[in-house]
Amino acid sequence: MNETSIEDILDYRCWNPMWDAFLSVTDIYDPLEIQEIVCIVSMPDRSGVLIISDSGFYTTNETALNALKQFSFAHCLPEYPVLSSVLKDIGAFGRYKFPWACPNFTLCPLEGVRQSIWINPLKIENIYELGGLHYAQLLNGIKLMVPVQRYYALLRSEIACGVLAAIRQDTSDLSSRPMDYLKIPNTSFGRSLVKRLLLKKFVTCKYEIHRRYQRARFLHYFEKLEKNPQDIHWENWQ
């Protein structure tokens, strides 16, 4: 890998020339224009996020969670609050900092004291250290400062990929190994990822996440209907 300087890295902590370079080519966020998100990065010292996808770069004044909520709604994909409650109840995927996942891809949160970044773990080439800081180099060449060390990025990626494989298992009978449901790149990060326990053996039964999600979603909206029926977005049910 070529020598990297701090000026080459998109830094979530403070504004640098890389932010100007990205914002000069961004479009306004329209979730229907995106099929797969690579990462969501909060902009420093101002509201809004930068969304990097395989098809381009987008900005919105919304928070990362609201941008993800809009994407889920536009594509009729799992809602994060409901999915995270399901994963918490299962227990095998930890108790906090849950990923978001759908059959197509997954995003895991890498959280620091001030900011969090949502990143697609299957798009990471590796996590590197530079002057006591850490950055992710993505498969598309973009370098992104992250608030966690490589070990913790692997831990969060393992959980996210484990959930993704469990969701994909519901629609296929490829194998009994989670890693067979994932296209893990042959990179330093990918080679470390395939060794993780959650990718060696499923911790859920087939259809378990789907079944639990449908029940949790029903109860979620039923409670809302009881308390505040005027707040229900009825277009979701058409």
Image: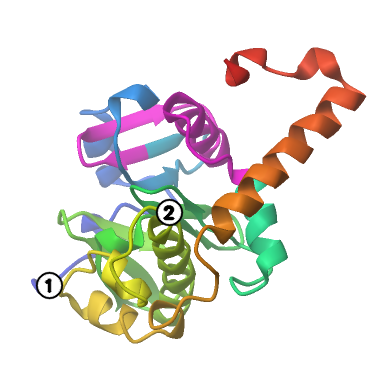
Distance, label 1 to label 2, CA atoms, is 28 Å
Residue at disc 2, secondary structure: strand
Crowding around mark 2 (Cα neighbors within 10 Å: few <14, some 14 to 19, many 20+) is: many
* Residue found at x 17% / y 75%: 187
Numbered disc in front, either 1 or 2: 2
Determine the residue located farthest toward the right in the rendered image: 227
Residue 177 position, x and y percent, is: 35, 77
Residue 86 position, x and y percent, is: 66, 56
- The boundaries of the magenta stretch are 51-80
Going by the numbered disc 2, the residue's amino acid type is Leu
Left or right: residue 227 compared with residue 187: right
On the image, numbered disc 1 is attached to which residue? 3
Please say if 55 is above or below 199: above
Considering the image in quadrants, where does the N terminus appear?
Answer: bottom left
Determine the residue located farthest toward the left in the rendered image: 2
* Residue found at x 65% / y 53%: 212
